C-alpha cells in the first residue's frame, strides 16, 4: 500500500448515530485506503459497560484479530486506556496521556504492519485528548490534519480541551473545520493559518429515495408532526419547544435519536405530545424522517452555536422536507434562506410550521432536493 489515511476519531464508528468523520472516511475509502480508530473506552468503562456489545467487541480484539472491515474501511479496534480526565492539568496528566497514546499507537502499528502501510495521512478528527498519537507511529506521517467538527461545549471536554485543542491545531500541517466561525478562529488566534472550511453534507441518495416506508417507532403517530433527528442534548432550546407545543395543540413533537436525559427538562420528558424513538440506525433514519410534516432544528443561540453546522440539515432537504430552524448560526443559515425558514422566537416558529403545511407544493419539495444534491459527501 502507498498513502493511507488514518482517522483518529472522537465520534465512534459504532455509536448510536453517524458522524462527520465516519461519513468522510467512507467517501475517501472509495479511492484511498482508510484506517479508522475510535476514541477508546477506559479500563473502568470496559468493566462497567461489559454488557454493551460495543464494549464486548473491544474485549474480543484482545483475543482475536485487531481489526474488521466495514464499508470499505479498516476499523482498528481501539484498546482500553487509563481513565485520566479527572486529573488536573500538569505532569501526571501528561505522563498518563503519553502512556495512553502509546497504547493506541501500538494497536495501530500492529494493524499497519499486517497491511504493509508505507506512510500515513493522519487525520485527528476532534480527538484532542490523544492528539500526539502520531509521534508513536512506526510508519512515516506525511501530513497531519486537525479536523474540528464542533465547538468544545461540555465541562468534561473543556477541562483539558481548552489547551489540548490549540496544541493539536498548532502541531498540524492544516486544519479543516465544519463551520465558518470554527475555521476563522484558528487563524484569528494564531493557531494555524492553514485553516479551511469544509461544511457537513449528506448521503443524498439514501435520503432522497422514493421508499416512503415508516419506521416501526413512528407508525402509530397520528396528526401533524414536527420532527427532529439527532442527539437530544444540551444545545436544544427546550423552552422554545414547550412554547411551540402550546401554540400548536394538535401537533406532535417527534424527537428521534439518542437521549442525554440530564439535559432534558421533565416538562419535555413527560409531555403527552412528545415522542422519543431512541437511537436509530443511520440506514433507517429516512423511514423516520418520512413521518415528519416539518423537520426542525431547535438549537439554542448561545456562545457555542456559531460553531455548529448540523449534519441533519441536508438530510432533511434531501428527503424534500420543509425545514424550520432557530437562528442559531446566521452565517450558514443565510445561504439556505430559500429552503430553510429561520425563526427568532417561538411564535415565529409555530406560525412557520402552520404556514408551511398550508402552502406545501411539489415544486418546493424538488427545490429542496436540488439544494441537497449540491451538498453530497462526494462533492
Image: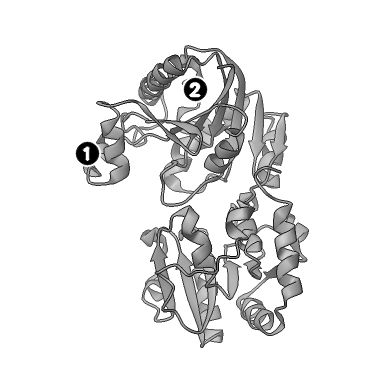
Task: Name above or below for residue 35 compared with residue 27.
Answer: above
Labels 1, 2: front one: 1
Secondary-structure class at tag 2: loop
Task: Name above or below for residue 201 compared with residue 350.
Answer: above
Q: Which residue is mark 1?
A: 47
Q: Between residues 36 and 41, which one lies in front from this camera angle?
A: 36
Give the distance between the C-alpha atoms of the residues marked 1 and 2, in whole angstroms: 27 Å
Mark 2, other Cα within 10 Å: few <14 / some 14–19 / many ≥20 = many
Residue drawn 46% across and 51% down? Answer: 17
Q: Quadrant of the N terminus?
A: top right
Secondary-structure class at tag 1: helix
Quarter of the rendering containing residue 62? top left
Residue drawn 60% across and 38% down? Answer: 27
Q: Quadrant of the C terminus?
A: top right
The circle drawn on residue 132 is: 2
Farthest front residue in view = 210
Q: Between residues 350 and 112, which one lies in front from this camera angle?
A: 112
Q: Earlier in the sequence, mark 1 or mark 2?
A: 1
Horizontal relation, residue 306 to residue 276: left or right = right
Horizontal relation, residue 51 to residue 167: left or right = left
Quarter of the rendering containing residue 26? top right
| Residue 212 position in % (x across, y down) | 55, 69
Q: How is the image coloured?
A: one colour
Task: Name above or below for residue 312 compared with residue 123.
Answer: below
Mark 1, other Cα within 10 Å: few <14 / some 14–19 / many ≥20 = few
Amino acid at each position: 500500500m502507498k498513502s493511507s489515511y488514518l482517522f483518529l476519531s472522537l465520534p465512534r464508528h459504532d455509536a448510536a448515530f453517524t458522524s462527520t468523520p465516519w461519513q468522510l472516511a467512507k467517501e475517501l475509502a472509495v479511492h484511498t485506503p482508510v484506517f479508522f480508530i475510535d476514541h477508546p473506552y477506559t479500563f473502568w468503562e470496559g468493566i462497567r459497560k461489559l454488557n454493551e456489545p460495543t464494549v464486548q467487541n473491544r474485549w474480543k480484539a484482545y483475543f482475536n484479530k485487531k481489526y474488521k472491515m466495514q464499508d470499505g474501511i479498516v476499523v482498528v479496534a481501539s484498546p482500553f486506556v487509563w481513565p485520566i480526565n479527572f486529573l488536573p492539568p500538569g505532569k501526571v496528566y501528561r505522563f498518563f496521556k503519553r502512556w495512553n497514546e502509546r497504547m493506541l499507537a501500538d494497536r495501530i502499528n500492529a494493524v499497519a504492519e499486517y497491511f504493509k502501510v508505507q506512510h500515513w495521512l493522519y487525520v485527528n478528527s476532534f480527538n484532542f485528548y490523544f492528539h500526539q498519537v502520531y509521534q508513536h507511529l512506526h510508519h512515516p506521517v506525511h501530513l497531519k490534519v486537525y479536523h474540528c467538527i464542533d465547538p468544545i461545549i461540555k465541562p468534561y471536554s473543556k477541562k483539558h480541551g481548552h489547551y489540548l485543542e490549540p496544541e493539536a491545531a498548532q502541531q498540524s500541517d492544516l486544519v479543516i473545520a465544519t463551520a465558518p466561525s470554527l475555521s476563522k478562529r484558528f487563524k484569528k488566534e494564531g493557531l494555524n493559518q492553514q485553516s479551511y472550511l469544509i461544511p457537513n453534507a449528506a448521503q443524498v441518495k439514501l435520503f432522497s429515495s422514493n421508499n416512503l416506508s415508516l419506521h416501526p417507532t413512528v407508525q402509530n403517530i397520528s396528526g401533524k408532526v414536527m420532527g427532529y433527528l439527532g442527539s437530544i442534548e444540551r444545545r436544544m432550546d427546550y423552552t422554545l419547544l414547550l412554547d411551540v407545543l402550546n401554540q400548536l395543540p394538535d401537533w406532535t413533537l417527534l424527537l428521534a435519536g439518542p437521549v442525554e436525559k440530564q439535559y432534558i427538562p421533565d416538562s419535555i420528558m413527560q409531555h403527552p405530545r412528545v415522542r422519543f424513538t431512541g437511537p436509530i440506525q443511520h440506514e433507517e433514519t429516512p423511514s423516520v424522517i418520512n413521518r415528519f410534516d416539518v423537520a426542525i432544528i431547535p438549537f439554542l443561540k448561545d456562545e457555542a452555536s456559531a460553531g455548529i453546522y448540523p449534519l441533519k440539515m441536508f438530510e432533511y432537504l434531501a428527503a424534500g422536507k420543509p425545514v424550520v430552524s432557530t437562528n442559531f448560526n446566521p452565517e450558514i443559515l443565510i445561504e439556505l434562506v430559500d429552503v430553510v425558514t429561520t425563526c427568532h422566537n417561538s411564535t415565529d416558529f409555530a406560525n412557520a410550521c402552520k404556514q408551511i403545511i398550508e402552502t406545501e407544493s411539489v415544486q418546493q419539495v424538488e427545490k429542496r432536493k436540488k439544494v441537497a444534491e449540491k451538498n453530497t459527501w462526494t462533492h
